[in-house]
Amino acid sequence: NPERANVQLSPDGKRISWLAPKDNVMNVWVAPVDKLDQAKPVTTDTKRPVRQYYWAFDGKHLLYIQDAAGDENWHIFRTTADGGEVTDITPYKGARAVVYNVSDKKPKTLVIGINDRDPKMSDVYSLDIATGKRTLIYENKENMAHFSVDPNQELRLAGKLEPNGKSPSTTVNAQNAV
């Protein structure tokens, strides 16, 4: 484990965060930007390292991705910047969630993909960070594999895999695929 990795500044510029070991497992730590000696872990995973996390632009939350025992069914978890309760905001058994967009233009929502309807392909949703309520943006019946979302959290592009499983060299507009 590195001493520190994935250092990020909070959206308000008052805190700094990073991944570092807690009891030999990588977790998210937060400190005031001018008092690094006051750092404390805001996640306390004991079995699986946290490898990816995001500051939410709502000024309250950190989000991180975690799976269970290496099953690669990633879920998105929410905690507060001061280390409050951890909540799985994508608690769909056997499904994998991916973050497509975190934006300062829509600080209370994320755009995510989740494959709970069809395990082979993700549908795209807007997800309320505070409640976990999701709103469908794009039902993926065309087997799109990649999505691009703009800062306004508008779905702009989607791409399919070739039949051999490789990424194509071109991308199609998701709005035209509906």
Image: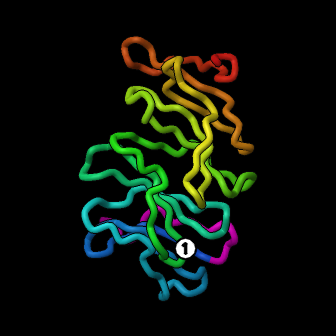
Q: Residue at x 67, y 64 (%)?
A: 58
In this rendered view, identify the residue nearer to me: 156 or 18.
Answer: 156
Residue, disc 1: 81
Q: Residue at x 32, y 67 (%)?
A: 45
Q: Is residue 149 above or below residue 121?
A: below
Residue 24 x %, y %? 26, 71
Which residue reaches farthest top? Answer: 163
Q: How many marks?
A: 1
Which amino acid type corresponds to the residue marked 1 in the rendered image?
A: Ala
In this rendered view, identify the residue nearer to me: 60 or 31.
Answer: 60
The boundaries of the magenta stretch are 1-14
**Disc 1 element:** loop
Q: Residue at x 38, y 68 (%)?
A: 27
Q: Within the magenta stretch, is there residue 33?
A: no
Image quarter of the C terminus: top right
Q: Is residue 146 left or right of residue 177?
A: left
Residue 51 x %, y %? 39, 57
Residue 145 x %, y %? 49, 26
Decide whether the magenta segment is chiefly helix, strand or loop: loop
